[in-house]
Amino acid sequence: MFLLDSPLQGEIRGERSLMAFPFFALAKNAWMKPLAYQSDKVSIEVRPSATGVATIYDKEIVLYIASLMASKIEAGEAVGQDFVFTAHDLFSVTGSNHSARSYARLSEALERLQGTQIKTNIEAGGEGEEGFFSWLSEARLHYTRTRSGERRLKAVKVRLCDWLFRAILRDRQVLNYAHAYFQLGPIERRIYEVARSTCEADSLEIDLAMFRLQVGYQNPLPNFRAALNHIAAADAIPDYHLALVEVAEDVAADAAPVRRGRKSHPLRVVISRRAPELAAESESGADPAQ
């Protein structure tokens, strides 16, 4: 018999590095290709298992576990790497329905989280790691059988990886998520996470190509631009407003030979915080403060 962790009562939380950088595939279905991110300071390599790379939807489980852990820390409780919870509570928090298909997806998500291999130079809790790790070093579904022989899920037991456990326990770089996050599509989720974790001032401005890498978008840049134009028009990112802005070319570019055809200008992505009253309208009850 397992002792269940108390149902989550507070906000959904996320570790800052997992918000800022692309560790998960932007897909609903299996993504079988490796992922990579490289900047001057950060390198990330993600390898799929036989069932694919963990997706942005699988990440909901990681967020739920991080939230349970953060709540325990705030309450002054001892925390370990093992967590036991019900699928019912997980689904209630993330807004998933309680259908048989949701339970099947849970099993698939746990398998991907345990099988995906991650390598990064980001240090956690003052320590670095060489080699690969998985988000969950253990993931099991425990069930009983009814008199008719039907399986009934009792509990989900997982063990959080050392890297993320240290990051939450020691670094304490954990931020709240808006409740509306779970209603967003894959790209919108990543835009929100990047904005939430990196927008220290009232706005963030970044080159379109660099932003594509940080979001983790795998298709060509023109496709990303089209997707962002659609997202900007919908203006549904909780707490933040997104815009694409053409920037003037510098003198050196103006001196270069003019090519035939329509002249394009470099694009930058500008993300700005919504005014408090507008944020409240788009996300009732969300707390944008850490």
Image: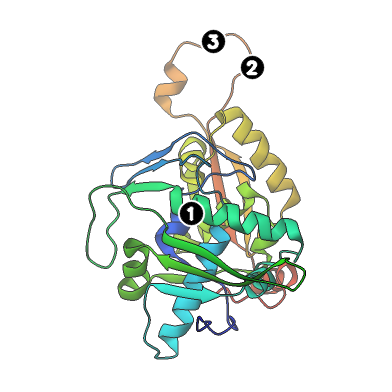
**Viewer-nearest residue: 226 or 19:** 19
Q: In the drawing, what numbered circle is on residue 94?
A: none
Tell me where residue 46 appears, x and y as whole percent: 40, 43
Q: Secondary structure at mark 2?
A: loop
Residue 244 location in percent, x, y?
Answer: 61, 42
Where residue 282 appears, x then y in whole percent? 73, 67
Front one among 80 and 172:
80
Residue displayed at 57% across by 54% down: 109
Residue 123 picture quarter: bottom left
**Sooner in the amino-acid sequence: mark 1 or mark 2:** 1
Gap in Å between the C-alphas at discs 3 and 2?
A: 8 Å
Between the residue at mark 1 and the residue at mark 2, the CA separation in whole angstroms equals 46 Å
- Which residue is disc 1 drawn over? 113
Dot 1 lies on which element? helix
Label 2 sits on residue: 262
Is residue 202 in sight in this rendering? no
Is residue 144 placed above or below 228 in the rendered structure?
below
Q: Is residue 190 above or below residue 171?
A: above
Q: Which residue shows up at 34% across the image and 41% down it? A: 39
Q: Label 3 belongs to which residue?
A: 259
Q: Are marks 1 and 3 in contact (CB under 8 Å)?
A: no
Q: Amino acid at mark 2?
A: Arg
